[in-house]
Amino acid sequence: MLLNQDISQARKNAKFMNKNTLRTASSGQHKPHQLNPYCDVHTLLDAFEKFEADYKK
């Protein structure tokens, strides 16, 4: 699937952004609703892939 390459890069970018967002967050603000709205996108991408894999079984 052509999108797999894009999703792989998106996952890498999301992990990097998440790490930097947590590193630069204000003290005591580490909950998702206090951070960048795109934090944890990589976990959403993982869930999409898991759903697809489970669906194909």
Image (tube, rainbow, N blue to C red):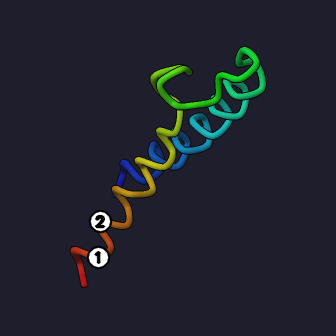
**Going 77% across and 26% down the picture, which residue do you hit?**
23
**Going 45% across and 22% down the picture, which residue do you hit?**
37
Q: Secondary structure at mark 2?
A: helix
Give whichever of 43, 7 is nearer the camera.
43
Considering every residue shown, the one lying at the far top of the view is: 26
Q: Could you say which disc has been placed on residue 51 in the image? A: 2
Above-or-below relation of 33 to 45:
above
Q: Name the spot of residue 41 as percent of width and height, x first.
A: 47, 39
Q: Name the spot of residue 55 as percent of width and height, x first.
A: 22, 74
Quadrant location of the C terminus in the rendered image: bottom left
**CB atoms of marks 1 and 2 within 8 Å:** yes
Q: Name the spot of residue 48 as percent of width and height, x first.
A: 34, 56
Give whichever of 23, 41 is nearer the camera.
23
Residue type at mark 1: give it.
Answer: Asp
Which residue is the site of mark 1? Answer: 54
Quadrant location of the N terminus in the rendered image: bottom left
5 left or right, relative to 31: left
